Image (cartoon, rainbow, N blue to C red):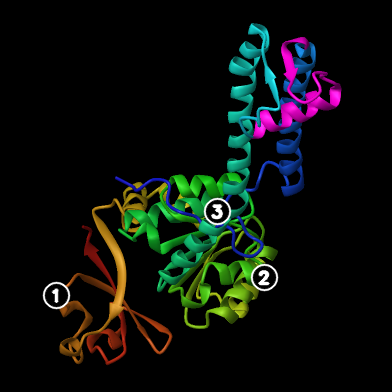
Amino acid sequence: MRPRNRPSLRGFGPVLSQPAALSLAASLGLRVAMVLALFAIAVGGHWFERAGLKDQIDGHVSFTDVLYFTAVTVTTVGYGDIVPVSDAARMFDTFVVTPIRLFVWLIFIGTAYGFFLQRGWKQVRTRMTQRSLHDHVVVCGYGTSGAAAVDELIGQNVNCDCIVVIDRDAGRVQDANDAGVIGIVGDATHDVVLSTACVGRAARVIVAPSHDDAAALIVLSARRLAPKARISVAVRAAENEDLLRQAGADAIINPVVLGGHLLARAATNGHAVDYIKDLAAAEGRVALCERTARADEVGRPLSAIATGLGVRIIRAGRAIGWFDPEAQQLEAGDIIVEIVRAG
């Protein structure tokens, strides 16, 4: 079961997990208008029932007296210099002015909480969340590809607290929060947004925006801020793959081209394509993974490894197949690509 409603990085710099429906000035203006409207209702009622009020000073109740009496009655319980004496005036104070007094205080308290206490708490939560982010995964873009990547990470048992999603769309970030991961509303092409996600301490960065130009900018910024992180990027145009590789991407996936390859192969090799899907998905029976050759494996052939079925070696950046002569003797530092049983 996924954890729900994970915290977002809120109130830090220019990014928010959910944009406010109203600006600060508009929100304050709305609250002031509500207080004035309630006060006007109280003033109108007291003026209408002014015959039921008694001024202990001069015996005459003017409009100024009504304003004064309403103000002290709404904000306190009054001072006793003007008092309601008729049943109608007393009932109005009991059933109208008293609820108005409560609403006004709730508005004042809500304003103080919303603009001071809540914002301060959000900043504290943001800094606490940021301190906990180490060797995490930053996902830039929560469209179709980004959401699928997050689902796959969760399927691979990556802790939801270690996944940070960045997207400019607040609705998508809310979807990411609902999936159980941390969300940031912001443009990942900006350094301040990536820094808010602590990308410099991230182990992996997944770049999946809607456009290749944004992907290139994100990769450039992420590589500069996180020189040791492994960066994977989705590209839509094949001609941009070299550009993204030069920008610093470690892995480049073209979903359109890859999908075309699988479609063509599925026409004659459906079972083989099913096996490829099985390898790629976390819920599959087998998994394709990579690791560094252990000391006790050095000098032995790739086919002799006991952890899985070795299919490839990466040696000094060069791919060596299980069928190549070099695969008959593993060397220190070799990266082994193997098929293992999932789970």
Quadrant location, the C terminus: bottom left
Q: Is residue 69 left or right of residue 108?
A: right
Q: Is residue 72 left or right of residue 317?
A: right
Q: Is residue 84 left or right of residue 339?
A: right
Looking at the rendered structure, the secondary structure element under dot 1 is: loop
Overall secondary structure of the magenta section: helix
For the residues marked 3 and 1, what is the alpha-carbon distance in whole angstroms?
Answer: 58 Å
Quadrant location, the N terminus: top left
Q: Which residue is mark 1?
A: 306
Q: Position of residue 3 (x, y in %)?
A: 35, 48
Q: In the rendered structure, which amino acid carries the disc numbered 2?
A: Leu
- In front of the other: label 2 or label 1? 2
Q: Position of residue 10 (x, y in %)?
A: 56, 57
Q: Position of residue 40 (x, y in %)?
A: 77, 24
For the residues marked 2 and 1, what is the alpha-carbon distance in whole angstroms?
Answer: 42 Å
Q: Which residue is mark 2?
A: 217
Q: Which residue is mark 3?
A: 117
Mark 3, Cα crowd under 10 Å, few <14 / some 14-19 / many 20+, is few
